[in-house]
């Protein structure tokens, strides 16, 4: 290369340096945000705490390797580059170097294996005697939770006590899903025809729920397959469990009563259960206490009578691919707008 081309290359590099520096600062600043609801580095559950030890070690070692390799690459590229008065050359074969760069990975892998084996052993412990046992079942596109000893079934909102182990059987009725609550536990696949398990203890009760998410692509609304985990004190959990085990509430108003009648004579009961009523379908979410849930549609809409109406009218409008057929007459269903309003009022009353 001649001198002018070298000068141009240098000028170009200098122009890009501030941009690159800015990018590095932006990435570092983003890493300082600590309250990300779906960050696995926020440790709120025992499963996360166990995984965090090898995770952190791998991260640190990988960072050291990355920085060292990048630094050497840059230093060598500059120091030994071809330039006026210096011809670049290539050579291969250096026994001492090859021994060194074989030994370093062996040492790194050996170091990583220690906390890894510890974590595997910790995860393989038998289920605690006082554990809460829950079947978590993946559906396209929602989560079903069955409390095995309490005979309580709910959907998309999981309630658990703090400081007590929860042991899950992970199942699926259709395709592969994955159970993941980044701040608490996971991810572990939910495979049709095969039961996986995961267990964890939530470290503390808190008012805001933990966000869960299906972590395995499972079709159109994979991204809309979310759930929430509410961690309570033992006393609050016992109270929740008691209300969750109760039958569906009786309608409180004339509109709710009318909604109940429509619901019970419509296709709704073929798919949904309302405990203590004729509705005993198993295809869709159990609606016994749907009015007490904070969201509907597997966590995509805030639960209000208005969003329920929208959902009942044509759920695929708000959740692409939704398996629930449209109920609105205008969309090929059997219910008028007024009837949908009544059904939504009835469901909202199912606290
Ligand atoms: Cu279920 Cu992705």
Image: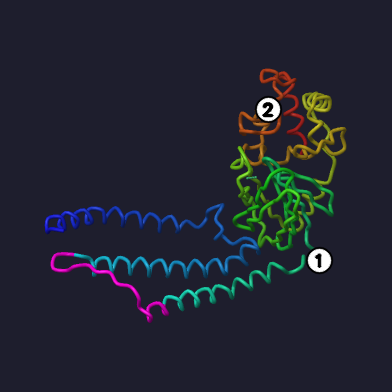
Q: Where does residue 316 sit, x and y in percent of width and height?
A: 64, 30
Q: Quadrant of residue 122?
A: bottom right
Q: Which residues are magenta?
A: 83-100
Closer to us: 232 or 27: 27
Closer to us: 324 or 128: 324
Q: Residues within 10 Å of mark 2 (few under 14, many from 20)?
A: many
Does mark 2 have its CB less than 8 Å from ligand 1? Answer: no
SS state under label 1:
loop
Q: CA distance from mark 1 to mark 2?
A: 44 Å
SS state under label 2:
helix
Return the disc, 1 or 2, that comes first in the chain's sequence. 1
Badge count: 2
Q: Is residue 54 above or below residue 278?
A: below
Q: Residues within 10 Å of mark 1 (few under 14, many from 20)?
A: few
Q: Is residue 9 left or right of residue 289?
A: left
Quarter of the figure with the C terminus = top right
Residue found farthest to the left? 3
Residue at the (73%, 58%) spot, across then down: 197
Q: Is mark 1 in CB contact (under 8 Å) with mark 2? A: no
Q: Where does residue 92 sit, x and y in percent of width and height?
A: 33, 73
- Identify residue for label 2: 309
Q: Which dot, 1 or 2, sits closer to the camera?
A: 1
- Identify residue for label 1: 129
Q: Where does residue 111 sit, x and y in percent of width and height?
A: 53, 76
Q: Where does residue 249 sit, x and y in percent of width and height?
A: 82, 36
Residue at the (68%, 31%) spot, across then down: 308
Q: Is residue 61 above or below residue 26?
A: below
């Amino acid at each position: 290369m001649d001198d002018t081309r070298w000068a141009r290359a240098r000028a170009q590099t200098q122009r890009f340096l501030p941009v690159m520096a800015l990018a590095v600062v932006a990435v570092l600043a983003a890493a300082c945000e600590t309250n990300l609801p779906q960050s696995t580095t926020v440790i709120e559950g025992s499963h996360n705490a166990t995984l965090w030890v090898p995770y952190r070690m791998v991260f640190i070692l990988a960072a050291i390797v990355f920085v060292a390799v990048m630094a050497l690459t840059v230093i060598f590229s500059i120091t030994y580059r071809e330039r006026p008065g210096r011809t670049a050359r290539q050579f291969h074969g250096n026994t001492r170097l090859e021994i060194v760069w074989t030994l370093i990975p062996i040492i790194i892998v050996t170091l990583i294996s220690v906390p890894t084996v510890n974590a595997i052993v910790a995860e393989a412990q038998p289920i605690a005697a006082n554990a809460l046992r829950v079947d978590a079942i993946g559906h396209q596109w929602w989560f079903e939770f069955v409390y095995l000893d309490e005979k309580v079934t709910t959907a998309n909102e999981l309630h658990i006590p703090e400081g007590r182990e929860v042991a899950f059987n992970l199942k699926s009725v259709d395709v592969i899903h994955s159970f993941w609550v980044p701040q608490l536990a996971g991810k572990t696949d939910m495979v049709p025809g095969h039961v996986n398990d995961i267990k964890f203890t939530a470290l503390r009760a808190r008012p805001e729920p933990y966000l869960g998410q299906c972590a395995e692509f499972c079709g159109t609304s994979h991204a809309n397959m979310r759930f929430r985990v509410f961690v309570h004190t033992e006393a609050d959990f016992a109270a929740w469990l008691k209300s969750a085990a109760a039958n569906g509430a009786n309608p409180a108003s004339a509109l709710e009563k009318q909604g109940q009648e429509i619901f019970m004579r419509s296709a709704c009961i073929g798919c949904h259960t309302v405990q203590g009523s004729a509705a005993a379908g198993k295809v869709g979410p159990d609606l016994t206490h749907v009015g007490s849930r904070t969201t509907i549609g597997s966590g995509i809409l805030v639960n209000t009578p208005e969003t329920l109406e929208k959902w009942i009218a044509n759920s695929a409008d708000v959740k692409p691919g939704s398996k629930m057929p449209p109920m609105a007459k205008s969309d090929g269903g059997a219910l008028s707008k007024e009837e949908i309003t009544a059904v939504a009022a009835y469901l909202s009353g199912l606290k």
